[in-house]
Amino acid sequence: MPTLAQLLQPIHELNVDLMLVIYLVAIAAEAMSGALAAGRRNMDIFGVAVIAFVTALGGGTIRDVILGHYPIGWTQHPGYVYLVICAGLLTTLLARYMHHLHRIFLVLDAMGLIAFSLIGCTIALELNYPTIVVIMSGMLTGISGGILRDVLCNQVPVVFRRELYASVSLAVCVLFLSLRALGIDMNLNTIICFTGGLALRLLAIQLGWKLPTFSYHQRWE
């Protein structure tokens, strides 16, 4: 009779491989979104490469610096740097066709948000940070790259003004920690959170779910 650990081994191997693939797809997709944002601001090729890099790897870099998690991830995996810069530069050649791939980009971006959030939580847990810091670590990893992209491109960050985005990251982080507290296997937990978070983000896009907005205009008398 196989043990529980043996039964879960295929899930463990699938989860590790799947998360790595999703991470690589996510940073490439984020790099391309950064390149498109740079193109809308008429930046040169160097600007495109910088914005692509910041968008894809900026969130993880900020997380590692804040948590004191050294060495920073991409410094140990230079292949990630090559991947995001090449993806950004490739975008300059494919930009005219990007509108046909809009829906695919939305899905890839959602996958990236969830994957980055889960990775951020996992790293903070490994460093034994308290719960609130773990949640913030996940959210920083998930949304900081997009915030940096928009700030450098001189626009209000998308995460603060469109469909549920940062809120999805928060929900995923809370669900991940809740299931962990209930003793759910880490790999099964990751799969549940990834599936649930992806569904929530895509529903928010499809149905236009948003948080209440605050509008204030000073009236001088």
Image: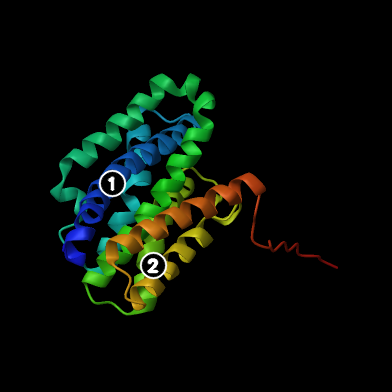
Residue at 76% from the left image edge and 64% from the top image edge: 218
Label for residue 176?
Answer: 2
Question: Left of 104 or right of it: where is 1?
Answer: left
Which of 107/217 is in front?
A: 107
Residue at 34% from the left image edge and 60% from the top image edge: 190
Q: Position of residue 57 (x, y in %)?
A: 31, 48
Q: Position of residue 47 (x, y in %)?
A: 37, 34
Question: Left of 85 or right of it: where is 36?
Answer: right
Which of 68/1 is in front?
A: 1
Q: Is residue 166 above or below residue 29?
A: below
Badge 1 local density, few (<14 within 10 Å), some, or many (20+)?
A: few
The single residue placed furthest to the right in the displayed view is 221
For the N terminus, the quadrant is bottom left
**Tag 1: amino acid:** Leu
Which residue does the numbered mark 1 point to in the structure image?
18
Residue at 22% from the left image edge and 56% from the top image edge: 12
Whether residue 218 appears in this view of the structure is: yes
Q: Quadrant of residue 130?
A: bottom left
For the C terminus, the quadrant is bottom right
